């Protein structure tokens, strides 16, 4: 079993498995595998092991969030679930580990239904509109929040 006290979960929600080909104007052409590779590499540099997961199912994402409760934290793009999943919101709220929410696109420059996030009020940080580099920014934010939590 890996040491969860030095592990960060990189969690992606629905449709993000299609990164690279899905709506490149909004999400670019970088694939999810490439994003994961970059975040894992940055994690190594910063002294944490990054484990990656993606699911299109709300309940599976809730289980993943629970599984991260003893980890350093979670970098999470909840996809569309950010806009309405109370189950995901409650899962984030139920764990102490910091969760930093990522949206690749600037959701506030898009349709109005994307302007609401039910998860944003319970996350430790929020990154939107920075493209896929947002995942790396979020990893740094998770580590900073974790350090604050322990000081
Ligand atoms: C997204 C924004 C959401 O509104 C959308 O449903 C996604 C991707 C983003 O990364 O910009 O699936 O989370």
Image (spheres, rainbow, N blue to C red):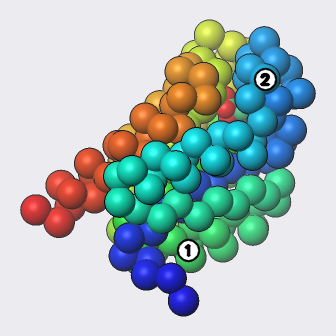
Relative height, residue 148 to residue 108 (above, below): below
Seen from the viewer's position, the closer of residues 60 and 37 is 37
Residue 107's image quarter? Answer: top right
Badge 2 density bin: few <14, some 14–19, many ≥20, Cα 10 Å: some
The total number of labels drawn is: 2
Seen from the viewer's position, the closer of residues 115 and 79 is 79
Residue 87's image quarter? Answer: bottom right
Q: Is residue 123 left or right of residue 87?
A: left
Relative height, residue 22 to residue 138 (above, below): above
Residue 38 spot, x, y in % from top left: 58, 42
Does the beta carbon at disc 2 come under 8 Å from ligand 1? no
User: Which residue is identified by label 2?
Assistant: 29
Residue 123 spot, x, y in % from top left: 42, 48
- Residue extending furthest toward the left: 151
| Residue located at (51% from left, 71% from top) | 68
| Residue located at (78% from left, 12% from top) | 25
Does the beta carbon at disc 1 come under 8 Å from ligand 1? no
In primary-sequence order, the first of circles 2 and 1 is 2
Residue 57 spot, x, y in % from top left: 82, 60
Report if residue 124 is visible in the image.
yes
User: Which residue is identified by label 1?
Assistant: 66
Relative height, residue 70 to residue 131 (above, below): below
Q: Determine whether the residue tagged by mark 1 lies in a helix, strand or loop.
A: helix
Residue 150's image quarter? Answer: bottom left
Q: Is residue 83 left or right of residue 60?
A: left
Task: Single out the mark in the foreground, 2 or 1.
Answer: 2
Task: Give the quadrant of ligand 1.
Answer: top right
Residue 124 spot, x, y in % from top left: 36, 48
The answer for how far apart the CA atoms under marks 2 and 1 are is 31 Å
């Amino acid at each position: 079993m890996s040491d969860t006290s030095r592990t960060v979960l990189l969690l992606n929600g629905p449709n993000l498995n299609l990164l690279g080909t899905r709506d490149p104007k909004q999400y670019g052409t970088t694939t999810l595998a490439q994003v994961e590779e970059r975040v894992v590499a940055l994690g190594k540099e910063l002294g944490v092991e990054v484990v990656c997961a993606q699911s299109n199912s709300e309940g599976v994402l809730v289980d993943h969030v629970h599984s991260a409760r003893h980890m350093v934290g979670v970098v999470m793009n909840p996809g569309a679930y950010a806009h309405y999943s109370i189950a995901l919101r409650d899962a984030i709220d139920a764990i102490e580990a910091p969760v930093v929410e990522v949206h690749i696109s600037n959701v506030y420059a898009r349709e109005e239904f994307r302007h609401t996030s039910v998860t944003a009020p319970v996350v430790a940080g929020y990154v939107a509109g920075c493209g896929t580099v947002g995942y790396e920014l979020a990893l740094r934010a998770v580590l900073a929040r974790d350090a604050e939590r322990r000081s």
